[in-house]
Image: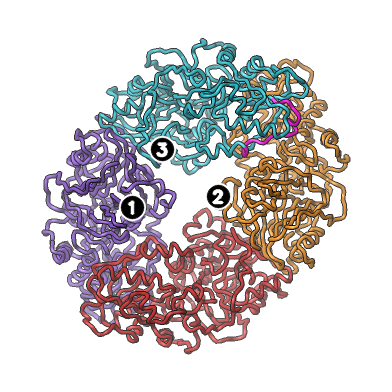
Chain colours: A red, B purple, C orange, D cyan
Amino acid sequence: MCGVFGIFGDPEAANIAYLGLHALQHRGQESAGIVSAEGGRLHVHRVMGLVQAGFGPKELATLPGDRAIGHVRYSTAGGSHLRNAQPFAVDYARGSIAVAHNGNLTNHELLRERLEAKGSIFQSSSDTETIVHLIAASTQRAAPDRVADALREVEGAYSLLLLTSDEMVAVRDPMGIRPLCLGRLTRDGRTAHVVASEATAFSLIGAELVRDVEPGEMIVVDEGGLRSLRPFAPQPRRLCLFEHVYFARPDSTIEGASVYDVRRALGRRLADEHPLPVGDASDSVVIPVPDSGVPHAIGFSGRSGLPFEMGLIRSHYVGRTFIEPQQAIRHFGVRLKLAPNRAVLEGKRVVVIDDSIVRGTTSRKIVRMIREAGAREVHVRIASPPTAWPCYYGIDTPTRAELIASSHTVAEIGRYLGADTIGYLTLDGLVDSVREVEGRAGAPGAPDRYCHACFSGQYPVAFAPSPRARHLRLLGS
Amino acid sequence: MCGVFGIFGDPEAANIAYLGLHALQHRGQESAGIVSAEGGRLHVHRVMGLVQAGFGPKELATLPGDRAIGHVRYSTAGGSHLRNAQPFAVDYARGSIAVAHNGNLTNHELLRERLEAKGSIFQSSSDTETIVHLIAASTQRAAPDRVADALREVEGAYSLLLLTSDEMVAVRDPMGIRPLCLGRLTRDGRTAHVVASEATAFSLIGAELVRDVEPGEMIVVDEGGLRSLRPFAPQPRRLCLFEHVYFARPDSTIEGASVYDVRRALGRRLADEHPLPVGDASDSVVIPVPDSGVPHAIGFSGRSGLPFEMGLIRSHYVGRTFIEPQQAIRHFGVRLKLAPNRAVLEGKRVVVIDDSIVRGTTSRKIVRMIREAGAREVHVRIASPPTAWPCYYGIDTPTRAELIASSHTVAEIGRYLGADTIGYLTLDGLVDSVREVEGRAGAPGAPDRYCHACFSGQYPVAFAPSPRARHLRLLGS
Amino acid sequence: MCGVFGIFGDPEAANIAYLGLHALQHRGQESAGIVSAEGGRLHVHRVMGLVQAGFGPKELATLPGDRAIGHVRYSTAGGSHLRNAQPFAVDYARGSIAVAHNGNLTNHELLRERLEAKGSIFQSSSDTETIVHLIAASTQRAAPDRVADALREVEGAYSLLLLTSDEMVAVRDPMGIRPLCLGRLTRDGRTAHVVASEATAFSLIGAELVRDVEPGEMIVVDEGGLRSLRPFAPQPRRLCLFEHVYFARPDSTIEGASVYDVRRALGRRLADEHPLPVGDASDSVVIPVPDSGVPHAIGFSGRSGLPFEMGLIRSHYVGRTFIEPQQAIRHFGVRLKLAPNRAVLEGKRVVVIDDSIVRGTTSRKIVRMIREAGAREVHVRIASPPTAWPCYYGIDTPTRAELIASSHTVAEIGRYLGADTIGYLTLDGLVDSVREVEGRAGAPGAPDRYCHACFSGQYPVAFAPSPRARHLRLLGS
Amino acid sequence: MCGVFGIFGDPEAANIAYLGLHALQHRGQESAGIVSAEGGRLHVHRVMGLVQAGFGPKELATLPGDRAIGHVRYSTAGGSHLRNAQPFAVDYARGSIAVAHNGNLTNHELLRERLEAKGSIFQSSSDTETIVHLIAASTQRAAPDRVADALREVEGAYSLLLLTSDEMVAVRDPMGIRPLCLGRLTRDGRTAHVVASEATAFSLIGAELVRDVEPGEMIVVDEGGLRSLRPFAPQPRRLCLFEHVYFARPDSTIEGASVYDVRRALGRRLADEHPLPVGDASDSVVIPVPDSGVPHAIGFSGRSGLPFEMGLIRSHYVGRTFIEPQQAIRHFGVRLKLAPNRAVLEGKRVVVIDDSIVRGTTSRKIVRMIREAGAREVHVRIASPPTAWPCYYGIDTPTRAELIASSHTVAEIGRYLGADTIGYLTLDGLVDSVREVEGRAGAPGAPDRYCHACFSGQYPVAFAPSPRARHLRLLGS
């Protein structure tokens, strides 16, 4: 997964991009980069690791100009190398261009082969480089037209930001799989346009959310202002449900729907679908796996009437489990990150709420930890359906073989975890809940307007069944 | 504030100390250190910054032996230099000795002058060095007797761990101001003794909590086992209440009382003492300042019947506000760390719960942030009395002049924050709540058995009214 | 200037490349890189700074395979960024390819424009990327044929190493401006082919010098052995004389001629052309500007009969003046690097020998330093003609305006330096001396078979008169 | 070995100390430190590694004041840790004091035991800490008197600089084993006093050498100016001859004698004592092991009439062999550092000149390297007597067992090296040569006024026969 941020029209563009990327840090911690434009030139700085570690006053001073785009990355393919860091920036016939990409192109291997056959060279293993080659190959004159030309050839998910010396372009793929939103920052009487993967980035910098970039929309910002283009044939919207379930920050809003509200609604629906077995309610507690499970657990607690407590305490000094690239750290990380709170758990019937289960190894350790802290019963409730299919649209899920739900029934999973009972939200429950919150915002998606491929196996975009590893030929930094 | 951890009798002593310190990381992030003993020698490694950043397999391999003590530090005096990192380790006539200290000696300037007059030299500005000089000056033969000799001369708060090649010594000051607890780790059929500032460290390493080290108790662990000594004249216990209010981790237990339970009780009492003004309950929410205010807010919500929600979302990528040494970062840190969750706040009467207010600058920004996110009313509730007095026993509070409550009435503070109403817990409410939870654990402290100097100005130990800066003569690393 | 090293057929290819690059470190200190090939993949590691700082056991372990090429770089254009580090490695239609380049293409701006017009994108500002695009654009099938195709389009100086998964290719431009030599390393009964910019790299690794790669020769090494190809139309050889004067290591041999012997011969000829004015020989000394001036001074001393002494002592802790990129450091560096040896200089007529003068600022400080140390007279002797023209073939000389000899007569330079007398070697003297030493090796070049453009302004290859800065559009790392 | 530098009375004291230490870098590369004084406080910065790596503008800005002392260190005992870096700085009863020490105290174990018995604690393993304890224990009032008091108790070699907030004190031990010299720096009409281990440091900063600090002299510089004291009973001078043979820089002057002149004289005497065996002089060359052997080889060449050539080329990118702490690097370092120059060596009778032989392993590799480069004969000439005894006065020699000359005859050493002939200078030859150069400077030492213990085993100061490792109890950083 990745996060993108762009700003056009503020004298401190790079500084603000730095803050915007910090707010999107949860979307990728492997590398960070900012490209600014001034005087007909692009200025680039990219680093491995967190934004705050790699960008200081000295680095930001090398990024002049009133326009900038930035990127935080978690690798979905290729090694963990600076070479794959974004924004990707090149010179081509029409000048320089930089691209920041959130998503994944499903036909990029084919495109890459075609481009290589014509003589193109590739320096990274990222699909983003493919986009730039297509832009360079376009016969159009204006940058936005070239970008549209290029994107008409690609398939898959993308929320893109592009920067040239003259304009910033933001595009969301026709199905709108990944989020992207548009805002306005007014400082000292001057208004800049801002674009970000999530609206929480606007909140930090004091910008105002204007609206979401719409599926298939291309927004061009230049000295003359902002234009909205529709270069693609319309397609049904297919918003990624996993953004709501887990990925986005709870204070973000996606197409009008508060992520926090959605998660609470998921928790409420989960309580309806999988209530605690009949028993003594007076010694039952609902606890989240923090922090991602907190809103779901608040919803479950509210609907079930069982008290919400913090039965697991999270350390502030370890990063997000799902996003760490090395298995060893992830493995060890569970105990380093979460501590059982015996005062809450001892002697209790514990309902533990999590957003999803990937491999099951972490959940199993959590169940054991809760039981060792004295819980009488442990009831696992998951606020989404079983994750049984890999994502090909930008989320770094493991292969099918590693997804526990792809080869185990729910009952088997419950036994593996050591839970007394287990309940997953139904897909209908998930879709209904999201629609309900979207509805309150005035714009409920039709039931089939979501991507739930990771739960259902119904992929809205065809993809090469077994992506070859050819683009990994070049290894290293 | 600082954290200490010790282990005696496990072949991987340094590795376990590393994990133990990680669990105590919230008690100090400025420096970290471990000293192990093997073959009559002490092995030392100390670094600036976090435990996980400064200790890797290579560093841990330089720390052999089956006994080790460790320390995480937040400077209470002196500069932020490696020289002041702990454990403090020296050679003296009887061998080598290392000391890890949590607390603060109130008479150390006088002791230092006396020692210097006799010819002692000082290399650090920490009071810990004073303790070591006193140990070296003792005429006793055995290390524990020398330590007792030394500590009879000091005044103030200390939870100490000492390591020589032959023994580990743990001491808690006669008033028991700082916590310290004793545990047992059994691995591969071998049992090691462990000591830590908080029991959460035992939880991580899989050790069992045996009991708290008692005020005035000295525990000596050597090859022959564990002995408990009582070298000091008995004094009334004076446990620091701020550990319960803010400092300790909620999953820790201090003298039998769960910190989480205490905090929930504080929240309940706060709801009784300062309920929301009469109004429409249907649009009211209780939100914590995360993470420290969460248990208090759960308590407040439970008692008041108003719903608990996460109205402020915490970034995982910035450290703990209170503990950062530089004003600039702390200042900027509020926005980088907390984001308003508009879905929860908009149009609502918001009760925001925090554990305490120090300078007031952070709270003021939080109130403004909540209001800008659309809250109709903002009611501030603080789960402790006004913090009006500096701590001289080991917590890094600012000077009196910087404590907003030392020069402003509660009403003035409320106006400064921009709150509709404000309510602080009473000192009676605080003491009663702690006693209530201690009572459930079977051992309620008498009402006067706590240190609440930071709230009341009643200092249990006299201190030099204006500590001179003489020990700061030597600056640098 | 840059250095290249390649090896094919040794199980420790990357380790040996590491050593080879260390021996070539004097040719470039800005960045270093190694690419190895194994299992159909290329493995890359590139760093800023010295070889020994950026490559340790951990990095070398990521470079498996029995073939590798490496590069040390001093930037001739573009910023000092990792992006411009070499070897340059990409994927293209026929697989992966890596290129290490010493030299400079004089028509690369034109080629780049042409390639961009066809849709190519450029990520670096180096001319090396242009070569790779040309290779990718070739319609030939086999890699060596594609390389030949590509190089037929370029003009300028190049000694190139290329690595694919199947072969290593070494090419020297038709005029042989930059050196390149071929060797053989036998270890454990297995023989590997090695190629390096200078034979000193073979000396370090224990390899045997076979011969120089000939101007216009392309050597292809694969599993089947070594082939020599002649893909270009023959041209007169034009070996760079500055390699002999300054750049190459004295223990290297270029086309049979020992660099050390050449430098001694230059010193002897200089003594003939510019003897010390008549005076008391008993108090005269010949001193070099160390280390580069040492062999020239030994030659001058031998011919003149005046004693050779070390009148300037070089610090071991500062790098090579000529090669440091920042003016500030170069400026300050003179005093940090060279100290006057009063015991040698005081009261003496001092002949100070240097290989060349670029800006004159360093020489001026040296003359003053010698005089302040008590020298009665200071006679400057330079073992090459005045450097009055910039190099467009790979040596990082400053612009014409900065070259003191482009705007000052020899007499003016002498006055500027504060020298009593000054003498530069004549171009005839230089050419004759090199020919004499080459003659001893059996192969004297014809008098017009050298590139002495920096001295004469006679450029053997036409070049774009004012290279545009267009390729600098993209700044940063 | 170590180097010290001090300055009193220049507004940029720390900057100048930085330059001074750079000039003394050859005396120690393990750690570097500067202490400045301003406003009654000492300011400290110490780092591992080279001066130029650890001190930048930011660090120097933390060292205000017009007085400073500095130190570069190569550890003679204790681990390679920042804790042992100097200057050593402490607080004691009379204020703060910092000490920079070159030398070694032979009775410091006894003193340490005595101090520990009285209650002193030790944090480092260096003998310098002992000096500070003695200063603190003195009953005198003024700092210089306390220093004198302390030094009357120590035995061994020391050239010391001390800094308090009010004065800088420089002391040389009564036998003057280690050098120390006094200078004057005039800038902007203001004159500062400077002190350094070697006069080359004055040369770099533009200061004037006034004279050597005399054996047993204590120089006190304060606001009132400079005073010379004689606090010790006079003893015969015992200057370390190894400073002349190897350690000092050739451009330095020790007690009036140019180190360069001494080395040339040693080379001449060596040529007299051990001429090349009768043979064809026309194909003989004299080559140094660079850089330290260069002046000796120039002397040998001049006296013998055989031509001086650079037969071994030194890489600029590897540090000084003798001084690297790890055997592995030293071992590998020979080939990385020196390359044979075949043009000089092939077919020749080679006389290779080195200053000394320690273990013999390096020399052996050099002989083999020369032979492999085609030399017909290799004749080793060493410009000092066999090094058969360890140094207890501050030079980091290996133990006796590792010194090849302690267990092998000269003939055996020659065979081990693989030399055709070998010749060491006699002790008489060494002493005579030094006296001869000193004589030219007007002050020849009496023949018995030198320390040549490493050659003769005649130690001028008694020492504990087997220094115990007790002070190594504390390991780590």
Q: Residue at x 64, y 73 (%)?
A: A109
The location of residue D231, given as percent across then percent down, is 37, 16
- Report the mark closest to the observer, 3 or 1: 1
Mark 1 belongs to chain:
B
Instruction: For residue A437, say whether it is visible.
Output: yes
Query: Which label number is shown at residue B17?
Result: 1
Q: Would you name the residue on which mark 2 appears?
A: C57
Residue shown at the point (52%, 83%) measured from the top left: A238
**Is residue C98 or residue D35 the one in the foreground?**
C98
Q: Are marks 3 and 2 in contact (CB under 8 Å)?
A: no
Q: Which residue is mark 3?
A: D44
**Image position of A241 with respect to B151: above or below:** below
Q: Assess disc 1: are there few (<14), some (14-19) or many (≥20) residues with their C-alpha within 10 Å of its C-alpha.
A: many
Residue A474 image point, x, y percent:
63, 62
**Residue A288 lies in quadrant:** bottom left
Which quarter of the figure has residue C227?
A: bottom right
User: Foreground: D275 or A358?
Assistant: D275
Q: Which is more foreground, mark 3 or mark 2?
A: 2
